[in-house]
Image (cartoon, rainbow, N blue to C red):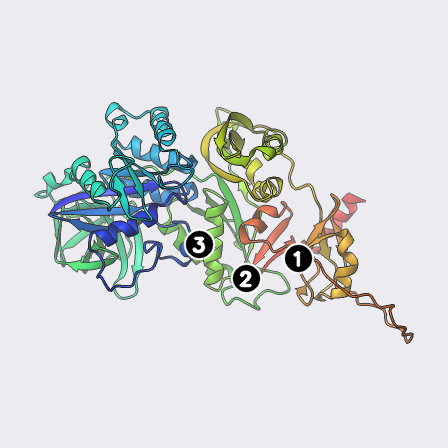
Amino acid sequence: MDLRNIAIIAHVDHGKTTLVDELLKQSGAFRDNQTVSERAMDSNDLERERGITILAKCTSVEVGDTRINIVDTPGHADFGGEVERILSMVDGVVLLVDAAEGPMPQTKFVTSKALALGLRPIVVLNKVDKHDAEPDRALNEVFDLFAALGANDDQLDFPVLYASGRNGWADVELNGPRKDLTALFDLVIRHVPAPAQIAQKDEPFRMLATTLGADPFIGRILTGRVEAGTIKAGATLNALARNGDRIEQFRVSKILAFRGLSQTAIDEATAGDIITLAGMTKATVADTLADPSVTESIPAQPIDPPTITVTFGINDSPLAGRDGKKVQSRVIRDRLMKEAETNVAIRVTDTPGGEAFEVAGRGELQMGVLIENMRREGFELSISRPQVLFRDVDGQRMEPIEEVTIDVDDEYTGAVIEKITGPRKGDLVEMKPAGAGKTRIIAHVPSRGLIGYQGEFLTDTRGSGVLNRVFHEWAPFRGSIPGRRAGVLISMENGVSVSYALWKLEDRGRFFIGAQEAVYTGMIIGEHSRDNDLEVNPLKGKQLTNVRASGTDEAVRLTTPITLSLEQAIAYIDDDELVEVTPNAIRLRKRFLDPHERKRQSRASA
């Protein structure tokens, strides 16, 4: 069969995974009576809950005599490491753009990677049937984006389709028949070239591993595109590191190919196809799997370096070990190293003492997903505030700058601009009307200034604003940026919180806990109404006497406490605070100091 390898790229929530659902249905990948869940490619629990794609995944459809391998890529820049690896496997990209929103920051990030590899894009304007769709404006913005990213003439001469992924149609004209996705299938077959590797099918076998997985029955598996030659089950291969050193020699126990949503065992695969191999024990991502006669490895695509770091440590609070079973530093280290092996955008280093680990990644969302996965696996952790990584270039300190795109109601524009250009040291780049009473603001803001800003932004815009961010460049250090303004309320006792005590303390601030919750000394139970920290007693009950009179007792009615999500908690804490994460709870606390350090600090403050 003829082969086509494509990747579908888009900003978060522009309908990429929904479109893949329709491609699978209309190609006959499912039986007529087969029950298929919505967003079938989002197989991970967190992907389904959050409605975002986190892991890049492959599938394939058959259209006539052509098999199209489709790669569904993440839309968020925090998971860009997945995109950078996966694009090396394809020969073309379908860029999906919301006809109302136009190209967004994450679109820019992924598209820049695709254009740099020389891939010719197909632009699909999705959701053109929405009432606020402006396909002509969105198309002009896509062209401007391509030009700004340095696209060549062939890439700028891109074909365009108008589509509705949810309704399962795509047409060459905006007012076409709107029946099915035939136009998209035909365009992919015509516009995307067949893999150039097919011409090398008589050479010795070579394949670059791009994703690593594990199967409970066949063990370690590696997925990639066959760069040259033919492979049969039972063949002997070498695994080569990036420098050409041999890591191991192994026998291929199984060859799997993508057929619809499942992987099917095949006897033979040739150059150009995307396959999964089993049988290795040490080989990993970016290694070359090759015939024993091959001595040179295939160059791997460079991966952008991490921009933030978070410290993962053991949970040493008085409530440690009550929820989770995996609490030792050794077990935490093994899990983090396993993550770093499969996720090339993460870097793990040990700290002095070996009780904590520095995990560097792309952003708060990527860290939040990793921590959420670990707590669901039974881990207990203490997490520090994210810190931005700096660089020294010719003796000058450089910091990461992010491009922030904000869509906000016109009435809140002033408050947003004041926050990002004032204390957060951002530069306003562009401000324009976005229709429907909204304004689009584009600014370049230091990554440090955006840590913890999301919650404040939603408060300033009454929950109506949308903020998207993507790495822009490294720039000279812009000076100090103030942290959280408000202080916190800290428990001074161990025990269980009492309704009466919390009620009496409500004028001191807002609480993160309710009544009958376990607390301990040093645990942060609320936000102080002033800028200093305050120790309070949430266990103090009402003093009872023998005197009773009708009407003297007041009804205790507590204000609903604030429930922080994992990402909100990590962004909220200050440098001297930690987030305690267990399978059943997320708590905030002050760092515990040894007695000598506590005494030294008390003397210094005195």
Residue neighbourhood size for the residue with mark 3, other residues' Cα within 10 Å, grouped as few (<14), some (14–19), many (≥20): many
Percent across and percent down for residue 560 are: 67, 58
Question: Image check: 358 left or right of 103?
Answer: right
Percent across and percent down for residue 243 are: 27, 40
| SS state under label 1 | loop
Q: CA distance from mark 1 to mark 3?
A: 33 Å
Closer to the N terminus: mark 1 or mark 2?
A: 1
> Which of the numbered marks, if any, corresponds to residue 561?
1
Which residue, as the protein is rendered here, is positioned at the far left?
A: 202
Of circles 2 and 3, the one toward us is 2
Q: Nearer the viewer, residue 389 or 45?
A: 45
Closer to the N terminus: mark 2 or mark 3?
A: 3
Q: Which residue is disc 2 drawn over?
A: 582
Residue type of the residue flagged with mark 1? Pro
> Which of the numbered marks, if any, corresponds to residue 336?
3
Which residue, as the protein is rendered here, is positioned at the far right?
A: 547
